[in-house]
Amino acid sequence: MTLRPILIHPDPRLKTVADPVPAITDEIRRLADDMLETMYDAPGIGLAAPQIGQMNRLLVMDAAKEGEETARPMVLVNPAVTWSSEARSVYEEGCLSIPEQFAEVERPAEVEVQWLGLDGKTHTERFDGLWATCVQHEIDHLDGRLFIDYLKPMKRQMITRKMVKLKRERARG
């Protein structure tokens, strides 16, 4: 397994719709392993392939709360929300591609998602709480959408300026 560098906003790849994965291959399995290792190392609870420059509809997540639940690493290939509740919830979201920036985002409180597993089978699960927020956030990445896209323009521009400055500072070393 290999740690992969995480792209920082603004990067055009983060605004690009990812391509469906045609088949579960050893390459896709390796990518999923690398993504899980990268996500845990960051540390984060979700990571989408475009965040590491891979334009595939693949995400990993583990929203189990430390100390409360057993780790539950999940790999979702070609995920799609098939149902969402009318009830809404608000979570303060962050993103590995937008480090140290957080904002409240309102989303459906529950969603049902269908995806292809690394076993090649179709899976369906209903998520709520932090899991629902996480899976929706990561699917947004596959559609070229960031959590800051839900914010008012002024707040979004402020965060983007901070990220441009951060990227400049990192480039200088």
Image: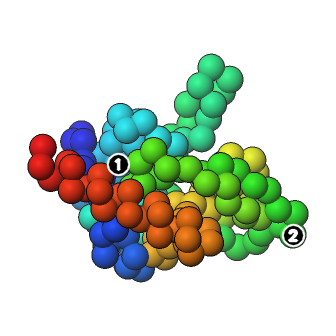
As rendered, which of 5 and 173 lies closer to the eye? 173
**As displayed, is residue 142 above or below residue 6?**
below
- Residue 43, above or below 129: above
Q: Mark 2 points at which residue?
A: 86
Query: Which SS class for mark 1?
Result: helix
| Mark identifier at residue 35 | 1
> Where residue 21 appears, x then y in whole percent?
38, 72
- Residue at 65%, 49% in the rendered image: 92
Count neighbours of disc 2 (C-alpha within 10 A) and say few if under 14, some if 14 to 19, many if 20 or more. Answer: few
The quarter holding residue 106 reads bottom right
Q: Position of residue 80 (x, y in %)?
A: 60, 72
Most distant residue in the right direction: 87
Residue sitting at x 33%, y 42%: 38
Q: Position of residue 7 (x, y in %)?
A: 30, 58
Identify the residue at horizontal 75%, vertical 47% (top origin).
Answer: 129
In this view, the residue in front, 68 or 113, is 68
Which residue is situated farthest in the left direction here? 172
Q: Quadrant of the C terminus?
A: top left
In the rendered structure, which amino acid carries the disc numbered 1? Met
Task: Kindly identify the amino acid type of the residue bearing the numbered disc 2.
Answer: Glu
Horizontal side of residue 51 vs 169, given as left or right: right
Q: Is residue 162 visible?
A: yes
Judged by depth in the image, the label closer to the viewer, 2 or 1, is: 2
Question: CA–CA distance between discs 2 and 1?
Answer: 32 Å
Q: How crowded is mark 1: few (under 14 residues within 10 Å), some or many (20 or more)?
A: many
Whole-percent x and y of residue 46? 49, 49
